[in-house]
Image: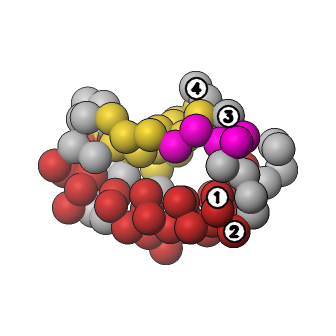
């Protein structure tokens, strides 16, 4: 499973770095390092919807506050 977080400047301002850190933490806590491939990407051209995150090919708009919910709802239910 691949999670890609936009680290372009607009998404960065909206907290993409915190989201990456939160995801890293949640992945480690659930021992999913071998299952989840977490990466970053430059601007996805969708800045108004940031922070832009894709899970495989599905688009999500996250904030640092909704990251845990996203992880529980979308990631843990797929592994
Ligand atoms: S900076 Fe994230 S979509 Fe543009």
Mark drawn on residue 69: none
Residue tagged 2: 29
* Residue drawn at point x = 33 percent, y = 61 percent: 17
Q: Nearer the viewer, residue 22 or 32?
A: 32
> Badge 3: few (under 14), some or many (20 or more) residues near its Cα, within 10 Å?
some
Number of residue marks: 4
Q: Position of residue 72 (x, y in %)?
A: 73, 62
Magenta stretch encompasses residue 36? yes
Q: Residue furthest top?
A: 57
* Residue drawn at point x = 38 percent, y = 67 percent: 18
Residue tagged 3: 1
Q: CA distance from mark 1 to mark 4?
A: 19 Å
Ligand 1: give its quadrant. top left
**Which mark's residue is nearer the viewer, 4 or 2?**
2
Residue tagged 1: 27
Would residue 22 be found to the left or right of residue 6 on screen?
right
Q: Quadrant of the N terminus?
A: top right
Prevailing SS of the magenta stretch = loop
Marks 4 and 2 close (CB-CB < 8 Å): no
Marks 2 and 3 close (CB-CB < 8 Å): no
* Residue drawn at point x = 50 percent, y = 67 percent: 22
Task: Confirm whether residue 76 shows in the render.
Answer: yes
Q: Is the residue 55 above or below the residue 28 in the image?
A: above
């Amino acid at each position: 499973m691949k999670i890609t977080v936009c680290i372009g400047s607009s998404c960065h301002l909206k907290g993409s770095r915190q989201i990456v850190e939160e995801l890293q933490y949640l992945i480690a806590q659930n021992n999913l390092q071998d299952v989840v491939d977490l990466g970053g990407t430059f601007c996805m051209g969708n800045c108004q919807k940031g922070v832009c995150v894709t899970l495989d090919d599905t688009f999500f708009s996250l904030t640092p506050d909704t990251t845990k919910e996203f992880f529980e709802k979308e990631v843990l239910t797929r592994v």
